[in-house]
Image (cartoon, rainbow, N blue to C red):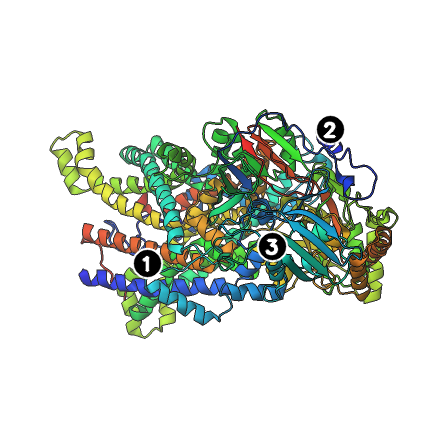
């Protein structure tokens, strides 16, 4: 078990290496660079060359990559080409926003998915079951950005109840912060609720067919007690791990929500980094996201294994 | 970011209380199609309409989707323009119809790439195991860790924005889903008796893969197919919404939405109509995928 | 549509006949009450259209820099007032020599830089030297191209010596932000000037904060304690933000929202005259598809300027084709007007002729357009639609800024692109010194000896009548060759909340916040 964990952890390194190289390469191959962006459309090739030199963009690729890697290993993600701000601080503030968005959205998704999944499982096969599952599936199918637009239109533009876009850190003004986060949370939460509800439902259904549940019923326990006491707990644990999986995928997909709601999270940071060809930022973000994703994967796998030793333990490699 | 089918964890291993089993390839396609229709009649119809409209777009659309009628711009639904007009006076119904075609292409191309690439990788990784599997799995993990949108931005940044390039990006990003799924089926399958027997007889690896193992993967792949197409359509619209996909005057639903949002106050029907078309298509495909899964893997249903 | 047209009429009401800058004078701001007493203090949030990408004023020409730092952190020797007369700023007075070969400037006293250093003539000399530095290759070098030397007889006097008479020099000075040598090595992280606001911080993609410069040379100014610029790239976001009150000033709302803004009791719409800012098409004169001047002329005739101005700009602009605005003394109506028409037949004919000359007729064209500029993107769509009726299959490529600049400039690889432009230039020499028209460096890759000679002559001839003749020749040449063409001169739109007073970018669109105050 520890061996597996160690193996997976070591497996993190090649993944990060691949990701960093890919990120670096694409930055290099993409047309245009920060120098052109700084100068504007009245630049000439000569001017671009001068600005490149000034901001250290003229060194050959492998040199820049090597320099960057040595910095990373020391925990320094470099500085933005545009304004010399340390990338770590930029990622720090962006990460807070994204994490808040994710946590709140997962909470919202759970608030929807749990009752829906439970009821659907209990009334398995019924019309209610079908409607509920259909409902959450619709929620997942509607594009988040469109849902976000419609929500913004209603609540911000038409009814002026909530602000249309923007962000204030929680530490600065908690109430205002939550106001800004409501719409994106709802949009994302609805999207996440679908798969989560189905997972709750199916794992609860499975648990309800377990021998020990049948025994509990045979003993004469009330249905509700059966469900609550025994089934639910066991059904929830895989649900949590499943939720963890979704989070991993979600970090990458947050860009669109952040664009629609103008949230200064990791997605916006990455997008702007690419638009400005600010490669230290791009590298830093991609690396952080990849790290997070792989770590969560490892965690989830471990939890799965701990939970049910009966699951076939496939060592990959 | 895909809706994962039940019964498989993210690394492709079969989980839950289901023992690894040899699932039967649906013997009668027609019978199963009817079963799918019975389960989700509306969704099947939606999918059918979508495919038909997409395929026949130039024949069905009342107007040329690029024809500009500046005098008639930004109108709501009317007799002349059933769904209204956009900011250049182009007929929205025609544009939405052609948008179905773009969405259809996006789905097919993206998923085509993902399926071919993914199944191949999954087969190889699962069958040969060992170091090959380790390396491939790490690469897959790395690919999945790279957010789709960033990949799309990178690709379009290199080769220029267009629907085709966006589809390639989506396709590449979806490869891991198919790969892991395939690998997850290959792993238990290759341990089965008849595969062992084939090897003993002296069948080559390629033959075994193609004849014995691949058919086993078909049900799972079929299920993933529908969801992946729905996802691809969703992603294409998101990328076009961000400006990385279709270029003007191509009527991708995503690009239309990105413009429509500027006119939300003046003409909300613009956003609503396009958004509905997009949502209905994706909903239809997802529900259809649900029905397919229920038919293909009866265990899930109960 | 009536409301907007009325606005426009009102805006250019006083732009009557007459030579000189005064033609542009007249009231151009509607609804700003100037009666209340200014209140000191407070923070103003401004929503800007783009983001700055660098802090050095000498190396960037990005519009975002104009909107934010150029006129707040820094000052120029002279300024212009509302009637476009030159007024003292960092210079108290000035005198051109009889022969036009030198300009003696007496500098204001008691001026300090943000880092405490006193302002002297040395700083003027340094600024010019830096602009001319080939190692910097500043895009603003043309402003001081003709300055051979800057003498500093004493701390308060600077003498510019020109290599040739430069009648437009005062206008050039409007874009020479005075810098000081002390601390110049930190220009990329902490720029320093003499302006009413000093730099506090630039948080990437989020905001730029400036604070009141306590030792500013004008007593009691600026009124504001803090000035914060927020990039809000999307015009709808800008509008919703100012409606919600989270910003006090916003630039470039979408023209289609003008009516709604005027109907809002909390907001004021400011419209500048359509003279110094323009939208245009830039054409690569060396590309196969577009190297024949007839093709380029055809493209200009194939563009429907009236539809563009009325339906896309909602009337906030004027059709144009040549570089000079109608109100400019250099504008030659006889030469320009024949080209200001929308004539698809003529375009087709020209394309056919060019096709016969070259052996193949234009059938495909790639039109580039930068992301984030909706109006000129519409221009591309309009051109594409019109071209499709005369046998040209045009495609549009929308690129984000970095990619666009790369294909336009760094490794020129384009056929035609839309563009929008505006530095508040009025003198024809200044207009032609920009990289849209500069003989040696223009983006069209148009290199023509006759053009170059004429441009230089126009810039160095003191007599205005002679200059007018030269510029007529230039306009004739440009119409014949059509290296690129304008489609409209545009008005700039600004929105302020009624609680914000004193915001007045002027007809040359210089974003000053010195006299701005909030309730």
Q: Secondary structure beneath disc 1? A: helix
- Quarter of the rendering occupied by the C terminus of chain A: bottom left
N-term mark: 2 or 3: 2
Query: Looking at the image, is B259 positioned above or below residue B127?
Result: above
Name the spot of residue C103 as percent of width and height, x first. 72, 55
Compare residues A127 and C495 and report the one nearer the observer: C495
Residue count near mark 2 (Cα–Cα under 10 Å), binned few <14, some 14–19, many ≥20: few
Residue count near mark 3 (Cα–Cα under 10 Å), binned few <14, some 14–19, many ≥20: some
Residue at image mark 3: C155
Distance in Å between CA atoms under marks 1 and 3: 85 Å
Label 1 resides on the chain identified as B
Name the spot of residue C468 as percent of width and height, x first. 85, 52
Residue at image mark 1: B185
Residue count near mark 1 (Cα–Cα under 10 Å), binned few <14, some 14–19, many ≥20: many
Label 3 resides on the chain identified as C
Number of marks present in the image shown: 3
**Residue displayed at 49% across by 27% down:** A160
Name the spot of residue C209 as percent of width and height, x first. 48, 44
Q: Quadrant of residue B63?
A: top right
Q: Quadrant of residue A63?
A: bottom left
Checking the image for residue C2, the label placed there is 2
Please give left or right for residue B73 compared with residue A18 in the image.
right
Q: Disc 1 vs disc 2: Cβ atoms closer than 8 Å? A: no
Inspect this view and state whether residue A62 appears. yes
Q: Secondary structure beneath disc 3? A: loop
Label 2 resides on the chain identified as C
Task: Choose mark 2 or mark 3, whichever is in front.
Answer: 3
- Quarter of the rendering occupied by the N terminus of chain A: bottom left
């Amino acid at each position: 078990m520890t061996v597996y964990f160690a193996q997976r952890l070591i497996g993190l390194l090649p993944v990060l290496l691949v990701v960093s190289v890919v990120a670096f390469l694409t930055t290099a191959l993409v047309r245009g660079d920060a120098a052109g962006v700084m100068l504007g459309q009245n630049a000439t090739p000569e001017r671009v060359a001068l600005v490149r030199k000034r901001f250290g963009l003229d060194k050959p690729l492998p040199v820049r990559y090597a320099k960057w890697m040595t910095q990373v290993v020391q925990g320094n993600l470099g500085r933005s080409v545009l304004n010399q701000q340390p990338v770590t601080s930029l990622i720090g503030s962006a990460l807070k926003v994204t994490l808040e968005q994710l946590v709140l959205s997962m909470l919202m998704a759970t608030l929807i998915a749990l009752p829906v999944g439970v009821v659907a499982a209990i009334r398995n096969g019924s019309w209610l079951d079908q409607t509920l599952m259909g409902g959450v599936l619709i929620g997942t199918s509607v594009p988040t950005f469109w849902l976000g637009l419609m929500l913004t239109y209603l609540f911000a533009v038409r009814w002026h109840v909530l602000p249309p876009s923007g962000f204030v850190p929680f530490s600065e003004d908690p109430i205002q912060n939550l106001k800004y986060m409501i719409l994106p949370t709802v949009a994302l939460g609805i999207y996440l609720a679908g798969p989560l509800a189905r997972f709750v439902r199916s794992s609860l259904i499975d648990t309800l067919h377990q021998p020990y549940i049948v025994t509990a019923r045979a003993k004469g326990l009330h249905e509700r007690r059966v469900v609550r006491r025994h089934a639910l707990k066991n059904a929830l644990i895989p649900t949590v791990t499943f939720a963890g999986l979704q989070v991993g995928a979600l970090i990458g997909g947050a860009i669109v929500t952040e664009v629609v709601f103008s949230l200064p999270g990791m997605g916006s940071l990455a997008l702007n980094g690419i638009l400005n060809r600010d490669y230290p930022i791009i590298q830093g973000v991609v690396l952080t996201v990849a790290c997070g994703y792989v770590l969560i994967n490892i965690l989830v796998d471990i939890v799965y294994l701990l939970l049910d030793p009966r699951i076939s333990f496939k060592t990959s490699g | 970011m895909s809706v994962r089918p039940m019964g498989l964890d993210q690394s492709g291993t079969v989980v839950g209380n289901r023992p690894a089993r040899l699932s039967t390839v649906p013997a009668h396609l027609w019978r199963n199609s009817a079963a799918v229709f019975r389960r989700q009649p509306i969704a099947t119809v939606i999918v059918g309409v979508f495919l038909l409209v997409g395929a026949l777009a130039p024949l069905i659309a009342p107007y040329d989707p690029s024809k500009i009628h500046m005098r008639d711009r930004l109108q709501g639904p009317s007799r002349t323009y059933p769904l209204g007009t956009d900011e250049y006076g182009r007929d929205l119904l025609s544009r939405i119809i052609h948008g179905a075609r773009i969405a259809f292409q996006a789905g097919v191309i993206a998923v085509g790439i993902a399926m071919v690439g993914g199944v191949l990788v999954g087969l190889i990784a699962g069958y040969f195991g060992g170091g090959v599997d380790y390396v491939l799995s790490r690469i897959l993990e790395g690919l999945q860790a790279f957010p789709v949108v960033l990949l799309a931005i990178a690709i379009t940044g290199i080769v220029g924005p267009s629907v085709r390039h966006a589809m390639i990006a989506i396709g590449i990003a979806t490869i891991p889903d198919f790969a892991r799924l395939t690998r997850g089926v290959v792993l238990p399958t290759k341990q089965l008796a008849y595969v062992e027997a084939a090897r003993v007889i002296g069948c080559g690896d390629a033959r075994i893969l193609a004849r014995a193992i691949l058919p086993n993967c078909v049900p799972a792949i079929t299920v993933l197919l529908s969801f992946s197409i729905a996802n691809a359509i969703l992603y294409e619209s998101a990328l076009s919404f961000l400006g990385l996909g279709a270029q003007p005057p191509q009527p991708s639903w995503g690009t239309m939405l990105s413009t429509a949002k500027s006119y939300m106050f003046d003409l909300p029907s613009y956003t609503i109509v396009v958004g509905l078309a997009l949502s209905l298509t994706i909903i239809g495909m997802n529900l259809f995928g649900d029905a397919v899964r229920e038919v293909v893997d009866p265990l899930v249903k109960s | 549509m009536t409301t907007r047209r009325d606005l426009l009429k009102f805006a250019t009401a006083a732009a009557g006949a007459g030579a000189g800058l005064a033609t542009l004078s007249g009231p151009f701001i509607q609804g700003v009450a100037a009666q209340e007493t200014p209140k000191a203090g407070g923070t103003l949030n401004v929503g800007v259209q783009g983001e700055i990408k660098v802090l050095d004023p000498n190396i960037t020409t990005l519009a975002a820099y104009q909107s934010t730092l150029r006129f707040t952190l820094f000052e120029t020797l002279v300024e212009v007032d509302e009637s476009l007369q030159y007024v003292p700023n960092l210079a108290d007075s000035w005198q051109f020599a009889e022969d036009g070969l030198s300009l003696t400037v007496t500098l204001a006293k008691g001026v300090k830089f943000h880092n405490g250093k006193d302002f002297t003539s040395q700083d003027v000399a340094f600024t010019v030297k830096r602009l001319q530095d080939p190692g910097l290759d500043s895009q603003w070098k043309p402003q001081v191209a003709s300055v051979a030397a800057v003498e500093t007889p004493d701390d308060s006097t600077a003498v510019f010596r020109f290599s040739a008479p430069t009648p437009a020099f005062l206008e050039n000075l409007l874009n020479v932000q005075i810098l000081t040598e002390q601390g110049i090595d930190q220009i990329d992280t902490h720029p320093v000037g003499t302006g009413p606001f000093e730099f506090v911080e630039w948080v990437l993609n989020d905001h730029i904060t400036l604070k009141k410069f306590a030792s500013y040379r004008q007593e009691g100014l600026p009124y504001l304690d803090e000035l914060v610029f927020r990039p809000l790239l999307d015009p709808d976001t800008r509008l919703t933000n100012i409606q919600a009150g989270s910003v006090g000033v916003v630039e470039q709302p979408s023209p289609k929202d003008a009516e709604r803004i005027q109907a809002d009791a909390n907001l004021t719409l400011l419209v500048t005259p359509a003279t110094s800012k323009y939208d245009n098409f830039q054409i690569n004169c060396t590309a196969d598809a577009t190297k024949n001047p007839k093709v380029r002329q055809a493209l200009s005739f194939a563009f429907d300027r009236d539809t563009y101005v009325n339906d896309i700009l909602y009337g906030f602009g004027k059709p144009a084709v040549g570089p000079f605005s109608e109100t400019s003394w250099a504008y030659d109506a006889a030469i320009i007007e024949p080209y200001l028409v929308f004539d698809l037949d003529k375009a087709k004919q020209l394309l056919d002729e060019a096709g016969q000359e070259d052996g193949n007729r234009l059938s495909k064209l790639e039109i580039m357009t930068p992301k984030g500029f909706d109006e000129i993107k519409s221009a591309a769509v309009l051109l594409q639609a019109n071209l499709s009726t005369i046998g040209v299959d045009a495609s549009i490529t929308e690129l984000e800024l970095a990619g666009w600049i790369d294909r336009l400039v760094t490794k020129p690889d384009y056929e035609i692109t839309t563009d929008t432009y505006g530095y508040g230039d009025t003198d024809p020499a200044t207009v032609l010194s920009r990289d849209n028209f500069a003989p040696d460096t223009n983006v069209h890759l148009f290199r023509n000896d006759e053009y170059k000679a004429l441009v230089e002559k126009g810039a160095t001839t003191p007599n205005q009548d002679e200059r007018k003749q030269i510029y007529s020749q230039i306009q004739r040449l440009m119409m014949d060759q059509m290296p690129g063409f304008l489609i409209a001169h545009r008005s700039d739109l600004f929105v302020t909340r009624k609680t914000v007073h004193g915001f007045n970018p002027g007809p040359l669109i210089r974003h000053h916040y010195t006299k701005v105050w909030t309730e």
